Image (tube, rainbow, N blue to C red):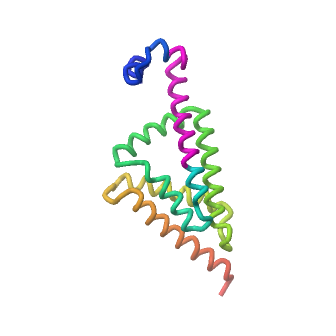
Amino acid sequence: LTFERLARACGLSGSTLVQRFGSKAQLKQRTLLYAWDGLDRKTEALSASTPRTPAGAIRLLGGLSSGYGDIESYAEGLLVLREDLRDPVLRARGAAWKAALSKVLADCFAGIPGMPQDIGLLMASHWQGSLLWWSFDPEMDLTAYVEHSLERFVAAITATSARAAAGPM
């Protein structure tokens, strides 16, 4: 990314972009913060319409998965993630999103006895893992793959919790 290429793409002059952003690093950071704002809005919108049930948690994460596109788009997104990981401000945004998402997911399991205290983070971690495993064999539709994987996770975790809640036999 250069100011010159961006200037051609957006119709502003390179000098205007330099004045607005100051440096390439600032331009990149502000662009990625804008992307985080979009992810926060999408997460909030999906969360607001999600029933607080395990099925709702699956639907929420399926909805968040629906924007990745094909394998090439997903792979490009991983390159962007690299930039997030290198910048402490962007890492902090990621950590805040993780906490907010984990809370919503945990709320979806609140009525089920015996759930691990960190069930929201466990489910988010499983979701992220399912995205990665899909990328190595992207034959199935991504959202369908993720939802199937999450359904299996929920079945396993709720069965384990039910056994734990029942106590020793």
Q: Residue at the spot x=52%, y=63% of the render?
A: 58
The picture places residue 130, in percent across and down from the top left corner, at: 45, 57
Could you tell whether 4 is left or right of 56 in the image? left
25 is within the stretch colored magenta: yes
| Magenta region | 18-42
Q: Quadrant of residue 3?
A: top left
Between 85 and 68, the one lying in front of the other is: 68
Could you tell whether 152 is left or right of 43 in the image? left
The picture places residue 6, in percent across and down from the top left corner, at: 41, 22
Quadrant including the C terminus: bottom right
- Residue extending farthest to the left is 139
Q: Quadrant of residue 103?
A: bottom right
Q: Residue at the spot x=38%, y=48% of the render?
A: 69
- The secondary structure that most of the magenta stretch takes on is helix
The picture places residue 93, in percent across and down from the top left corner, at: 61, 39
Q: Residue at the spot x=68%, y=67% of the render?
A: 110
- Residue extending farthest to the top is 15
